[in-house]
Amino acid sequence: MSWLHPERVAALDAALARRILVLDGAMGTMIQRYALTEADYRGDRFAEGYDALHAADGHAHGAGCGCEGHDQRGNNDLLTLTRPDIIQGIHADYLAAGADIVETNTFNSTAVSLADYHLQHLVHELNREGAALARAACDAAQAQTPDRPRFVAGILGPTSRTASISPDVNDPGYRAVTFDELVAIYRDAAHGLIDGGADILMVETVFDTLNAKAALYAVETVFDERGGRLPVMISGTITDASGRTLSGQTAEAFWYSLQHARPHAVGLNCALGAKDLRPHVETLSQIAQTCVSCHPNAGLPNAFGGYDETPADMAEVLHEFATAGLLNIVGGCCGTSPDHIRAIAVAVADVAPRRPPVTSEAAA
Ligand SMILES: [Zn+2]
Ligand SMILES: [Zn+2]
């Protein structure tokens, strides 16, 4: 199957061949700085705590219509609709700091996560508009520096449910979500991201490989329907000290169970700081016959839930990753800011990108 946007993929591949590409940093960390109130999150459209433009059975909202408002503070993805100025401004700040790839504000724009806010009908709209905001920011940055293409990574988050582990210790066979339910959920999100102009789809912060398989399967069915593909990135999360994902896999097992999706890049993000991710990134860099990415947190959370690693700290560690030949794409996750991304971009600017290994199998 061909690419949906062949010229964008050619630009991405040319850039990846030349240098280490820089991914942006945290969205949530930047949103926190605005200290937004419930009213900010709601805006006009959601002033009552529900969607004034949408009613479940098409009724007209009014006194006694029975619709209940729900708190929206913390629903960061909703800001795409209610404070697009803030979201696009954060994208612009990361691009100005040197990001080549920005991630859409859609980490929780799945039906599972939006159900917490009773807004699960917004999946397509939030993904489409989230991608459109990032697209507008990238196009503006690229217009300033035409020799430097900028890319939108449409983010498919992990959802709050796991398909392979029971949340009930007394009922190990129970699942809060099935594979087929996840496929349907991810299909809606992927369609929205593509409609909004994403260049890449990124399955991010994977803690359960079965969830990622559902996302990748969903994405394949969407590509089939549209008669073309986007490059796919997969980024897993190591959640325990033994170096495994929540569903119990090492970085090596993670790659072997997902390589069939032929991703443009595989990598690790979140949960740990850069230093603690190093052995696992090194493993991926040795075995993955594709690009390797890494976007760590700014260290482990401190007692107040904040992150302490400075831009200089992170840049120093990630510079070593780069000179060791481990990286094709690098950025930041929780606790990182445009200052972190600027320092990281400078640190890797003159370092050659990793060359994926050529195995006898691949060469044959
Ligand atoms: Zn109503
Ligand atoms: Zn994170």
Image (cartoon, rainbow, N blue to C red):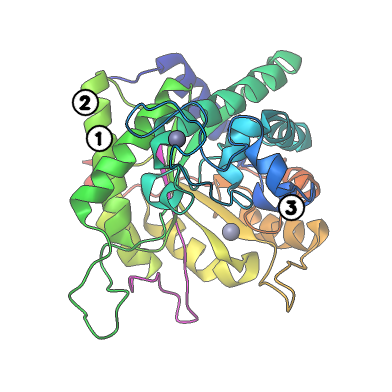
- Residue at the spot of label 1: 220
Which residues fall within the magenta stretch? 232-249
Residue 333 in magenta stretch: no
> Which residue is rendered at x = 62% and y = 53% of the image?
74
> Which residue is rendered at x = 54% and y = 50% of the image?
70
N-term-proximal mark, 3 vs 2 = 3
- Residue at the spot of label 3: 32
- Horizontally, residue 9 falls left or right of residue 167, namely right
Within 10 angstroms of label 2, few (less than 14), some, or many (20 or more) residues?
few
Residue 145, image quadrant: top right
> What's under tag 1, amino acid-wise?
Glu
What whole-number distance in Å separates the C-alpha atoms at marks 1 and 2? 6 Å
> What's under tag 2, amino acid-wise?
Asp
Kindly identify which numbered label has been placed on residue 13: none
The answer to whether the residues at label 1 and label 2 have Cβ atoms under 8 Å apart is yes
Mark 2: which secondary structure? helix
- Horizontally, residue 356 falls left or right of residue 323, namely left
- Residue at the spot of label 2: 224
Give the quadrant of ligand 2. bottom right
The answer to whether the residues at label 3 and label 2 have Cβ atoms under 8 Å apart is no
Mark 1: which secondary structure? helix
Residue 247, image quadrant: bottom left
The prevailing secondary structure element of the residues shown in magenta is loop
What whole-number distance in Å separates the C-alpha atoms at marks 1 and 3? 35 Å
**Image quarter (top left, top right, bottom left or bottom right) of the N terminus:** top left
**Image spot of residue 296 (x, y percent):** 61, 59
